[in-house]
Amino acid sequence: MICGTSALGIGGLLALPAALPASAAAAHPAPARHLKALYDVGVHPRITAAQARASELAATTVPEYTATVKVGAKSFKYTIVGKNPAVKVTNASTTVNAEIVPLIMKFSNGDSWSPTTADSCDPGASALSRTQNSPIVKTKLTKFGGTSVGTVQVTNAFQRAEFWKYAQPTGINPSFGVKLAFKTLNPVTINVPNADRAEFTAGCGNGLLGAAEINWLDNHLQTVVIPSLASQGVGSTTFPIFLLHNFVEYIGNTSQCCVLGYHNTFNTSAGAQTYGLAMYDNSGDFAGSSDISALSHEVGEWQNDPNTINPTPSWGNIGQVSGCQANLEVGDPLSGTTFNDALGGFTYHPQELAFFSWFYHQSPSLGIHGWYSDLGTFRTFAAPCP
């Protein structure tokens, strides 16, 4: 998600070399390998809890449910995509229409980055093709700790494992899950202004890692790009995902780099519009990130915190988080922890994600094997912070 009420802090950034503006960067760009990968940082959501609830009740956003959980004497109201797994229904499965929107990023000096063409980072296929054939989009038999959670997309596998008490074959909602029905739209070209761009040296592709200032880019998506896609079916009841290739965001200035993905929401006349953005990463420049790591992080977080405002008890000093935060962002505590997931002759690397029970101090956990994350890295709930 993007920064705001439920945002991450930036803490823990490495000491970074300054990148040059794109107008000068081609000659002496800074080395990308000195940068740190971050997610969800930098932009403020443009929606309130009341607006999100109104959109949910009017069915003008993606399918969601709102419920309350107690931690000690305190209650936390949250909204999650899909149907409530704890309430028995005839069909607990939810399908959400989603669009992959490739973004071609161009600088006035002629440098450009596109997910639609293969390059030396992966001459076998383009970033778009790899994504389309990845376990984010395709279904496959998935097991966690030796237990099958079904033949599903990897983020659906996480959602089922997270609420395994209800989704297991003997649970009250064994069909529970969130399926994404994808289609790919035509690429969108974005010309990044000189004042909002930078680049760093990289080891493959065109030899450069591109970057845009995150607040400029997010505003451009909300005010220009998303409205332009309405004729292709993008709207408040769908989930557009903007796909980049080896192109990141920085926050205000290049000393605060690099954001590999985020999700956000803003209010429209039709309802709350949720969306995500992620880099397909085969640059080799970020430890703990490759191919669909960022995309799996953002889709998992969108499912669990679509409006970026779900509060939790304070937690932190773990994963990419230095200090404390208090939101249901399931990727942040485990940023950089990935697993191998082979499909179609290629090995992808989705990120491990933290369970609902980890954030809300539930014991026993609702999750598979009583775990608190899908690979079992977390075996107890979150420690209080500070």
Image (cartoon, rainbow, N blue to C red):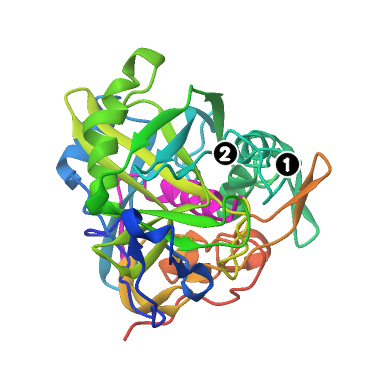
What amino acid is labelled 2 in the image?
A: Gly
The label shown at residue 177 is 2
Residue 304 within the magenta-colored segment of the rendering: yes
What amino acid is labelled 1 in the image?
A: Gly
Q: Quadrant of residue 385?
A: bottom left
Element assignment for label 2: strand
Which residue is found at the position 43% from the left and 72% from the top?
361
- For disc 1, the neighbor class at 10 Å (few under 14, some 14 to 19, many from 20) is some
Report x, y in % for residue 366.
Answer: 55, 60
Residue reaching furthest to the front: 27
Residue linked to disc 1: 150
- Who is closer to the viewer here, 267 or 203? 203
Q: Is residue 197 left or right of residue 136?
A: left
Q: Which of marks 2 and 1 is nearer the N terminus?
A: 1
Q: Is residue 303 placed above or below 259 in the rendered structure?
A: above
Point out the image quarter for the C terminus: bottom left
Which residue is found at the position 44% from the left and 36% from the top?
103
- Who is closer to the viewer here, 253 or 237? 253
Question: Do tag 2 and tag 1 residues touch (Cβ < 8 Å)?
Answer: yes
First to last magenta residue range: 292-312
Report x, y in % for residue 62.
Answer: 37, 31
Report x, y in % for residue 279.
Answer: 50, 49
Q: Quadrant of residue 17?
A: bottom left
